[in-house]
Image (spheres, rainbow, N blue to C red):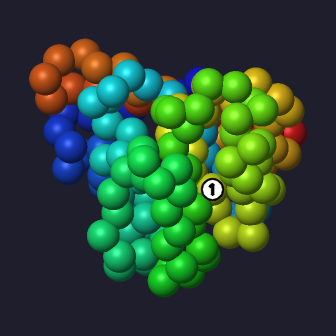
Amino acid sequence: MATFISHSAEETERFAERFGRGMASGCVVGLIGDLGAGKTQFVRGFARGLDVTDRVHSPTFALLNIYAGGRLPLFHLDLYRLETDDQIVAAGLDQYFAPEGIAIVEWMDRWHSTLPRCYYQIEFEVMSENERRIRYDHAGA
């Protein structure tokens, strides 16, 4: 895994924007980290990297936000309120693990079934009020 240390929310967004620019259709980006660790901030920058102009916000209560205005559709999932694979499947969210576009999934550690073929894992660790350790890996084959 590679590591990036972010010193601000803006730096996290810039890092994520670069990450999003190189993303290909069909990939899933799984985000793991505590509340307030920067996952949604990352999604905002990532969306900019896909040329999404809509306001990006956490889908915690909706479970899914779809942003179709960029160079690829972006499916933003939040699994925080779901605890099992069965609940994720019952909510119809498993279909986004093979997206026609990009799926970015907050709380991906709640999914315990097979990972998508094209999968990137991003882990967030709070180091201080403004600093985050962001570890990332391309786990797909």
Where residue 4 sits: x, y (%)? 39, 31
- Name the residue rendered at 70%, 35% in the picture: 87
Q: Is residue 29 left or right of residue 16?
A: right
Q: Is residue 34 left or right of residue 103?
A: left
Residue 72 in view here: yes
Where residue 88 sits: x, y (%)? 70, 39
Which quadrant, please, contains the N terminus? top right
Measured along the vertical axis of the image, is residue 13 above or below residue 49? Answer: above
- Name the residue rendered at 35%, 76% in the picture: 54
Q: Residues within 10 Å of mark 1 (few under 14, many from 20)?
A: many
- Name the residue rendered at 51%, 44% in the picture: 78
Q: Nearer the viewer, residue 56 or 50?
A: 56
Check disc 1 and report its element: helix, strand or loop. Answer: strand
Which three-letter amino acid code belongs to the residue tagged 1? Ala
Where residue 9 sits: x, y (%)? 21, 43
Where residue 76 sits: x, y (%)? 52, 56
**In this view, which residue lies farthest toward the left?**
129
Q: Is residue 48 left or right of residue 62?
A: left
Q: Is residue 77 left or right of residue 87?
A: left
Which quadrant, please, contains the C terminus? top right
Measured along the vertical axis of the image, is residue 97 above or below residue 47? Answer: above
Q: How many marks?
A: 1
Residue 22 in view here: no
Q: Nearer the viewer, residue 137 or 102?
A: 102
Residue beneath disc 1: 103
